[in-house]
Amino acid sequence: MDLPYFQVDAFTSRLFSGNPAGVCLLEGWLPEETLQAIAAENNQPETAFVVTGPEGFELRWFTPTVEVGLCGHATLAAAHVLFRHRGLEGDEVSFKTKSGDLGVSRRGEVLSLDFPALPAAACDVPAALVKGLGKYPAFTAKSARDYLAVYETEEEVLALKPDFAELSRLDTLGVIATARGMECDFVSRFFAPNAGVNEDPVTGSAHCTLSPYWSAQIGRHELTARQVSTRGGELSCMLRGDRVIIGGRAKTYLTGTIHLAAARKAWLSGESA
């Protein structure tokens, strides 16, 4: 079985920046262990698997170690592949996912995700969070998925040197560190050792939590954001009720084919490359 495969840099207008995602197009769902094995072999922060079903497109996301319930950059990458490489007509596509129906719209080169807001509520500061980030945050909150650690300055966020063993003790998927930006409304970094991704380059889904928080702090629904990882990435965010519209660009880095039958045959026979 040969599977079309793409690697896309998401939330960037240039290659070798943003967040890389694998996109694998399937005719039907493969066993979960096979999907996880492909994602581990790809070794990208996320691999998106897309199936064309009777009612449209279905989408699932896997890190190298686990399946996740929501992923922004790999959804952006999947839409980019369908529009750019599969000739999808129109300027809108919808995916059926574990987080409900997620829409992506296209305007020129900008793709906009329509995602659920995941607001965070103030909480006590866990010791593992402080030890893991190495600096006490000015404010701490928790969403249904992540901790949110707010700092006074962008420099503080840039200077963080996380202890991932400590962060992995937390009962959340990830930790968002954020502050007001110097050249944008806010900046962030995202750490998810529990998902097999110590630091994610650009995390669209984290902005489902960041957007409600910073919208309330700044007093605007439309915001500009930058994730200040080593690769870096740019996003636009608009809070719309209980939804967040997250915009960004994408660039294709690689197109290829996964030879699944050959890989399975080699695995069963114990052959090495």
Image: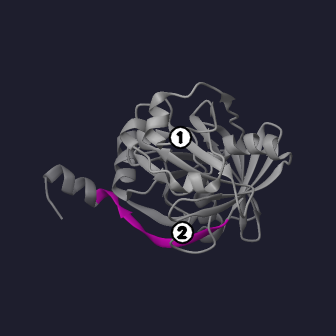
Give percent across and percent down for residue 147: 57, 35
Mark 1 belongs to which amino acid?
A: Val
Depth check: 137 or 230 in front?
A: 137
Q: Quadrant of the C terminus?
A: bottom left
Where are the magenta residues, as a range? 249-261
Would residue 99 be visible to someone looking at this image? yes
For residue 121, what is the image quadrant? top right
The local secondary structure at tag 1 comes to strand
Give percent across and percent down for residue 2: 38, 62
Give percent across and percent down for residue 159: 51, 55
Report if residue 144 lies within the magenta region.
no
The local secondary structure at tag 2 comes to loop
Q: Residue furthest bottom?
A: 14
Vertically, is 66 above or below 259? above
Would residue 53 be visible to someone looking at this image? no
Contact flag, marks 2 and 1 (Cβ < 8 Å): no
Give percent across and percent down for residue 265: 22, 55
The residue beneath circle 1 is 175
Looking at the rendered structure, which numbered label has been put on residue 17?
2
Task: Looking at the image, tell me whether mark 2 or mark 1 is earlier in sequence order.
Answer: 2
